[in-house]
Amino acid sequence: MIIRSAKFIKSSTTLNQCPPAREAEFAFIGRSNVGKSSLINMLTGNSGLAKVSGTPGKTRTINHFFINEEWYIADLPGYGYAKVSAKMRENWGAETVKYIVGRDSLACLFVLLDSRIPPQKIDLSFMELLGNSSVPFARIFTKTDKLSDNEIKKALEAHNNLMLEKWEELPPIFITSAAKRTGRDELLEFIQQTINIFKKSG
Ligand SMILES: Nc1nc2c(ncn2[C@@H]2O[C@H](COP(=O)(O)OP(=O)(O)OP(=O)(O)O)[C@@H](O)[C@H]2O)c(=O)[nH]1
Ligand SMILES: [Mg+2]
């Protein structure tokens, strides 16, 4: 897929505020600072589209971007960020879960995992929630520029083995680096195929 245009549409704090659920939508989630916004910028080829920050908890709303006037990207607030008040955290969490479970046009949720750190409980239990709610999702390893090929392979095995304790079938996984633009073609190809299926199932 060639990205011809990528346009910021709006920031929403609730599911109701989101744009009409017509076009196929791909959302990005994961722990704070995992690299969601950076990956969106890498995919769209626009380094200023989604706000990136070294400080966790940067993205606090559901942000919609319209791509090629055909499909949506949603940048979601990260989970597992402790430095906000419990009340605020609860609120974002509740609205984000409502979006994930209730967004009719969600074609695939990308769950981002930091390739440099061992599998985290919060990620595994989050994916279990997705499985239980029948939310279509795929995994994305981020920041692989920090690892050797062998380390990436080992990290992948560790994740898969742990998931196979609970899952019969593993969701797809993509190896990416926003810094080196790794995995861009594979992800865009997957998105294109998923859009085709989304359109057919109309
Ligand atoms: N080395 C490396 N650093 C990255 C990569 N992607 C993101 N980062 C860095 O990781 C930090 C967090 O990136 P963001 O894209 O803002 O992460 P996020 O998941 O959107 O974070 P929140 O919105 O706070 O939840 C920034 O300092 C980025 O520069 C990558 O592929 N390689
Ligand atoms: Mg972000």
Image (cartoon, rainbow, N blue to C red):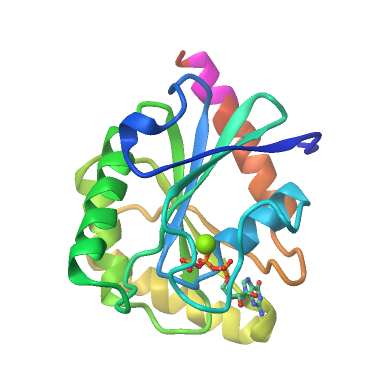
Up/down of 8 relative to 20, above or below: below
Q: Position of residue 24 (x, y in %)?
A: 52, 28
Magenta segment, principal secondary structure? helix
Quarter location, residue 136: top left
Part of the protein shown in magenta: 196-200
Query: Which residue is located at x 23 percent, y 55 percent?
Result: 91
Q: Which of 168 and 163 is in front in this view?
A: 163
Q: Nearer the viewer, residue 75 or 112?
A: 75
Q: Can residue 167 be seen in this view?
A: no
Q: Is residue 149 magenta?
A: no
Q: Where is residue 7 in the image (x, y as percent from the top left)?
A: 68, 37
Q: Which quadrant is the N terminus positioned in? A: top right
Q: Position of residue 74 (x, y in %)?
A: 50, 43
Up/down of 170 relative to 102, above or below: below
Quarter location, residue 178: bottom right
Please give the count of numbered marks on the rendered protein.
0
Q: Nearer the viewer, residue 161 or 111?
A: 111
Quarter location, residue 159: bottom left
Query: Which residue is located at x 69 percent, y 25 percent?
Result: 69
Query: Which residue is located at x 59 percent, y 24 percent?
Result: 196
Q: Nearer the viewer, residue 188 or 13?
A: 13
Q: Is residue 100 left or right of residue 166?
A: right
Q: In this view, does 188 lie to the left or right of 100?
A: right
Up/down of 10 relative to 59, above or below: above
Q: Where is residue 183 in the image (x, y as percent from the top left)?
A: 69, 59
Q: Can residue 10 be seen in this view?
A: yes
Q: In this view, does 142 lie to the left or right of 172?
A: right
Query: Which residue is located at x 73 percent, y 72 percent?
Result: 179
